[in-house]
Amino acid sequence: METSANNRRIARNTLFLYLRMGLSMLVSLYTSRVVLQTLGVEDYGIYGVVGGVVAMFDFLNASMSGATSRFLTYGLGKGDAKVLSRTFSTAFLEHLMIAVVILIICETFGLWFLNNKLVIPPERMPAANWVFQLSILSMMVSVTQVPYNASVISHEQMDVYAYVEIFYVAAKLLVVYLLLVVSFDKLILYALLMLTVSAGKAMYYRFYCARHFSECRLQWVWDPPLLKKMMKFSGWDLYGNMSVMARTEGVTLLLNIFFGPAVNAASSIATQVQGAVMSFATSVSTAVRPQIIKYYAQGHYPEMIRLMSNAVRLNFFILLFPTVPLMICLPYVLELWLGIVPEYTVIFCTLTLLFNFFANMSATLVTGIHATGKNIRPSLINGSLYILVVPFSYLAFRLKADAWWPFLFNVLAVVLGMLSNAYTLHLYIKEYSLWRFLKRDFLPCVFVLAVSMGVCVLLKPFCAQGFGGLLEMILLSSALLVLLGYWFLVPRSLSLKIIHRIKSILCKKG
């Protein structure tokens, strides 16, 4: 009975997260085009790379956010309200200190790096410095917001995300309108408006959490044992997150140094495409994450493993639907969407979409590892793999390699990291089988991806040109994926329910 209730909750939360994703993606597609055309390729690239300098230091925040989410969810699983309250207040205090550290680093090293190392036209340096300062403020808001977001997810109140997204969508549309009508430096104005929107969104979450979750009412707490546990967890996570930062923002800086702001624009577009498509599958990941950790806290390992396996395959299955037709028709879609397509955008997007598949599988495995509280091994192995992307990319560029090589290195690193995570989970939870993951999760997913892509590539010459061809490819790939996914990816229990439901409908009509 409890499992059935949990499944219904996960399904309900997934539905709300899809509503959030749909609204966000539709508006992002429109606003990205307008912002690119309004700012121009160069200013758009400057915004991406300058914001990236600030985001470099987000690894400090990312390390603590993982600890915060894990400990809050674990506390809910145990049902200890007192520990939960102390955990939240301790986490907020830590994130406040992290925000101050990021401020100091950015205003010293970051400011020097911006003005002395980045390739930015001299006449745009004043605007770039304004963007830098506004990005710092936005980052501080984001850092201190983490405990509140973690509380919403831990309580599985995913409908709140959908409601807030309605505000966020309206605000982004307003940003685009003001960008078009206000006579001011467009780059500075865009950064200022995005800061305002982010701050408004954060304030709503804080008000909601303080009103609905008792542990979110801040109190002065100094709990050394709890602090030690959280710092130990986040300390080992620090290396992994720092490496992820190097893999993403470090590559952004290398692209700027070797190729200039125009290639940064292509990289920023690829990142937006990656995020929009990834949101199709992360809705499931976000919905199941609290249950995975709670199952572990309660000692329900078979249920935890079953949920993880289903999430891996369903996430991959869902991700296939937008990705396959997009990868086949990418040049046309980008031109239709952006109008102006910077050089390298197609190859950057293709490799980031491929990266998505394995990063998504790996994220579910990491959730299981984080539930155990033992994150030393995965942080060291994954971090080492990810950070190697930067020196390999630098060496490749010195040897006159093309700009897309770092994106290929990213794919190789995430595949190796995913396999390592599966083995690590087997070491930490003996009931988890590495062979079962490879046989029942990984290989079926790769098989469906390869077959669907191969068939679509072979049939593409027979499709029409332009928008009609895109629709034909979407219909063709969807039909193929439904067939392949049903036989190879959909969990057996769900497929039996689907068959039973169809039979019931046919019998009623008969």
Image (cartoon, rainbow, N blue to C red):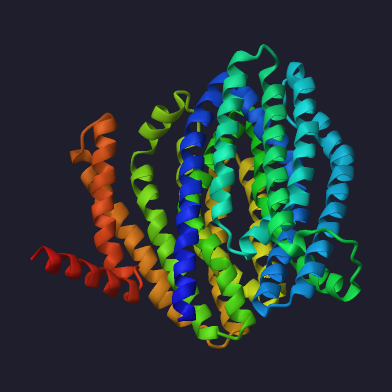
Looking at the image, residue 187 lies above or below residue 102: above
Total of numbered circles in the picture? 0
Residue 460 position within the rendered picture, expressed as x and y whole percent measured from the top left: 24, 42
Assign the N terminus to one quadrant of the image.
bottom left
Residue 451 position within the rendered picture, expressed as x and y whole percent measured from the top left: 29, 59
Residue 460 visible: yes
Residue 403 visible: no
Residue that protrudes farthest toward the bottom in the picture: 430
Quarter assignment of residue 68: bottom right
Quarter assignment of residue 481: bottom left
Residue 18 position within the rendered picture, expressed as x and y whole percent measured from the top left: 46, 51
Looking at the image, residue 97 lies above or below residue 82: above
Q: Residue at x 77, y 66 (%)?
A: 234
492 sits left or right of 368 in the view: left
Residue that protrudes farthest toward the left in the picture: 510
Q: Nearer the viewer, residue 122 or 227?
A: 227
Residue 301 position within the rendered picture, expressed as x and y whole percent measured from the top left: 55, 84
Quarter assignment of residue 319: bottom left
395 sits left or right of 333 in the view: right
Q: Nearer the viewer, residue 323 or 188?
A: 188
Assign the C terminus to one quadrant of the image.
bottom left
Q: Residue at x 76, y 54 (%)?
A: 61
Residue that protrudes farthest toward the front in the picture: 211
Looking at the image, residue 44 lies above or below residue 53: above
Q: Residue at x 57, y 50 (%)?
A: 161
Q: Residue at x 53, y 31 (%)?
A: 32
